[in-house]
Amino acid sequence: MRLPVIQYTGTEGVLDLGWGHPDPTLLPVEAWAASTSEAVPAAGWTALTYGYAAGPGQLLEWLTVHIGAIDGRAPEPAELFVTAGASQGLELVSSVLTRPGDVVLVDSPTYHLALRILADRGVELRAAPTDEQGIDPAATARLVGDLRAEGRRVPMLYAVATFNNPSGASMPMPRRRELIRALEGVTIVEDDTYRELAYEGPVPASLWSLASAGVVRLGSFSKTVAPGLRLGYLTADAAFVRRLASRGYVDSGGCVNHTSAMVLAHFATTGRYEAHVSVLRDAYRRRRDTLVTALRSAAPGVEFAVPGGGWFLWLRVPDAASLARRALERGVGLSTGERFHVGGGGGHHLRASFSMYSPADLEEAAHRFAQALPPPP
Amino acid sequence: MRLPVIQYTGTEGVLDLGWGHPDPTLLPVEAWAASTSEAVPAAGWTALTYGYAAGPGQLLEWLTVHIGAIDGRAPEPAELFVTAGASQGLELVSSVLTRPGDVVLVDSPTYHLALRILADRGVELRAAPTDEQGIDPAATARLVGDLRAEGRRVPMLYAVATFNNPSGASMPMPRRRELIRALEGVTIVEDDTYRELAYEGPVPASLWSLASAGVVRLGSFSKTVAPGLRLGYLTADAAFVRRLASRGYVDSGGCVNHTSAMVLAHFATTGRYEAHVSVLRDAYRRRRDTLVTALRSAAPGVEFAVPGGGWFLWLRVPDAASLARRALERGVGLSTGERFHVGGGGGHHLRASFSMYSPADLEEAAHRFAQALPPPP
């Protein structure tokens, strides 16, 4: 009997750029083990008993300072809640905000597995109208008005506004302010997973940091430390955090991932977090640059924007589905664009992740992909 | 700024038997730190990346053998799913089984915070009819029939059948078989948190082990290892496990607590689990015996059954609410019985937990409690 240990085990001979997983060599194995063997004995039994619902104070204190450094403003401790990863955060937040039959708006394209999490709520998913800057605030406000006029509840909008998965695009600052103003009464759930994987200069302030209320921002340690930890955080107004902390299962079990949160606080306050993220930024920047250069050289007819952060290139192609099939036959995996859309779209895009492979593998993948392209007409 | 770290911080001068928390001195601080510093480097990056949805193979393999040793039968690996604690397990299972407006049945008395988790689902909670052996199968089947005749959905029943929290009672074996037979079409969610904290001889086989399908059994490492880990497991039929594994947020994040599950597998397969649970059994048995003896001596008029396992004495008293108030004034905390009931009841019971304090503190608590009793008429 040999059971699986991890989620993705790969296919022999395939360089799978379809998966947004970290490069195994970039996971902080020794640093995490060392942090645990220091932090747990130092904290003693407080590391192992039921944790404070919103997360252990050490982690909340560090997050207030850290978020102040990477975003538009620092949260108060009462505006923070430690989650078991951004996906669990979205599950929890959408449980609180929605009821079956509600309409939930999403950006397009957007993180495809978020669509599945939201669908589990029994809600109807609708794409918010977009233009080249992302979600169109005025058109979206009109859609909300129309839906409400039909008697529908529209409690939330989900968006990956910064280094979007899959497109890599970030909503410009003026558009962020317009969106917040336009959507009063709709809670914006902002998936802010990629903020710290930024490869050039400043990152736009989060929607959360620009609004006084009505935005819940989901952060994660999956990309910056390790996804197996199932650890993240969110920022929201203090009243919303209190609603989360008073959920039955949080009240019963305390912090949803207390021991790991205690270790993360130690990993962070000993400087390991900053050092590790700095290594990641350099490594993923190099991977991005390698794949960009290799694709421009091998497949000059394929258009894409160079993302300022995150893990993905969003390739514009004539026929995504058939090209993905041909690419797979040549040993390179890609995600087809329609998975990232609600209600159609994406037929001319492929998502290529540069996170899981070495620069040499990425060059080989670009080469195989180019061979799968149809000959120029 | 000094933020809370843990859930329960206590009240100066109060011996609080109202909380079902572990004794801090019985948490395996050094053994957990050592297990992490061994397991994470040994497993390398597989300990830190996205885990297999149902849990890492090492832990599933150990659980098949371990559950075979402590329960009526061993599960197949496909019948196992690793959770982020029994409370998260109940949140997840009830999300899959129920819709707002459904009726969910519960045993009486029952774990009070489970009632809050279920209430978050927007369901109506109803007490299943009980007699001195626990849930009455025939009467419950009639209630289900009546509710369905009214057009209500009754998808699940929640019960703590073994070492019940709060009563300490276990449903007798024949009653278990009758209940399974009587409730076809209603999924029994069996909270089996206390099975391994058994202080005398064999423990009745779980409802899950007696049924071919239709029972989900929630297990936990909160009582046997540490609650801060937020780690547990459930056993169910393989089709139900597949439904859980295909939830959006499990599909997105993989195993809901992968790294801790990897460490737990190492903690278990190196023999630390068995050794630790053996220490716990002796320690909690002694605490139970101390509180039983002290109460019989100091408060002979207060009746209770001696539980064969778990953490609680269920004290029969004339007026629970006023006695709890007087006891608190004398420095001993107790939980009033009405919190463990749906739709009334419990006014003549107090729950006293012997888990959090030393034998000496438990003797002092019994003494204070006796002083709070009204004088005999």
Image (cartoon, coloured by chain):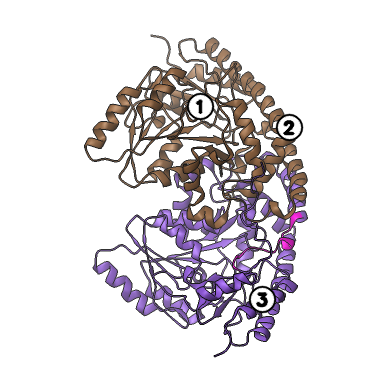
Chain colours: A brown, B purple
Question: Is residue B47 something one can see in this rendering?
Answer: no
Label of residue B368 in the image? 3
Q: Residues within 10 Å of mark 3 (few under 14, many from 20)?
A: many
Question: Is A66 situated left or right of B116 in this image?
Answer: right
Q: Which residue position holds label 1?
A: A206
Circle nearer the viewer, 1 or 3: 3
Residue shown at the point (72%, 33%) measured from the top left: A272
Question: Is B74 situated left or right of B249 in this image?
Answer: right
Q: Is residue B83 magenta?
A: no
Q: Is residue B27 magenta?
A: yes
**Which secondary structure dominates the residues rendered in magenta?**
loop
User: Residue B208 or B136: which is nearer the viewer?
Assistant: B136
**Which amino acid, by three-letter code, is at mark 3?**
Arg
Q: Give the farthest residue toward the bottom.
A: B377
**Which amino acid, by three-letter code, is at mark 2?**
Gly
**Which amino acid, by three-letter code, is at mark 1?**
Ser
Residue A87 at what x, y percent from top left?
50, 41
Determine contact: label 1, label 2, CB under 8 Å: no
User: Residue A54 or B85: which is nearer the viewer?
Assistant: A54
- Chain assignment, label 3: B
Q: Which residue position holds label 2?
A: A271
